[in-house]
Image (tube, grey):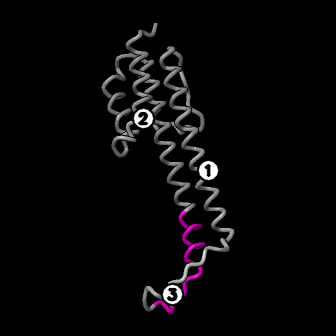
Amino acid sequence: MVTNHQKNLATIIHLSTFSRFIFPFGNIIAPIVLWVVNKDKSDFIDTHGKQAINFQFSILLYALLIGIVCVPFFAFSVFSHLDILDFNAFDSININITEPSPLFYIGGSLGALAVIGFIIELILIVKASLKAKDGEDYHYPFTIEFIK
């Protein structure tokens, strides 16, 4: 039987991921602290804590991968018109983006994908919090199990 206190703790663990809007890496630090302090109190809290932490680490990994892929596309599309050999002063820089290259579209698409992923992440966190409040288990989709 899951008590109301355990449901509230599991809900707070999921909602603590929003602390990233207050301090950097709060979405990882806050759930870890809450989970470590309360994981021995019940299996319900332990399961929800692991899920929240694994999801945040997975999101961090996915964001890093998208960023690593996006940066070269933007860099090559913006700086492809610069003539490095004739770079004497800042007055000779001429960046023309009136006709974007296909690389710019690919990088922009990946950026749009990151924004859509962020919105889906927020929805999934709220959904997990509501499931925890109801005393149900929740497993985030596309989550890599770093903590088993």
Question: Which residue has dot 2 on it?
Answer: 17
Image point 44% across, 28% down: which residue?
Answer: 14
Query: Identity of the amino acid at label 2?
Result: Thr
- Residue 139 got which mark? none
Q: Main secondary structure of the magenta part?
A: helix
Q: Specify whether 108 is left or right of 45.
A: right
Count numbered badges in the picture. 3
Whole-percent x and y of residue 86? 50, 92
- Residue 113 got which mark? 1
Whole-percent x and y of residue 109? 64, 56
Instruction: Tell me how far mark 2 sits from mark 3, CA to CA.
Output: 45 Å
Structural crowding at the residue carrying mark 2, measured as other residues with C-alpha within 10 Å and reported as few (<14), some (14–19) or many (≥20) = many
Q: Quadrant of residue 53?
A: top left
Q: Secondary structure at mark 1?
A: helix
Q: Is residue 81 magenta?
A: yes
Q: Specify whether 98 is left or right of 67.
A: right
Q: Secondary structure at mark 2?
A: helix
Image point 35% across, 46% down: which residue?
Answer: 24
In the image, which residues are magenta? Answer: 71-87
Question: Which residue has dot 3 on it?
Answer: 84
Whole-percent x and y of residue 121? 54, 38
Instruction: Tell me how far mark 1 sits from mark 2, CA to CA.
Output: 21 Å
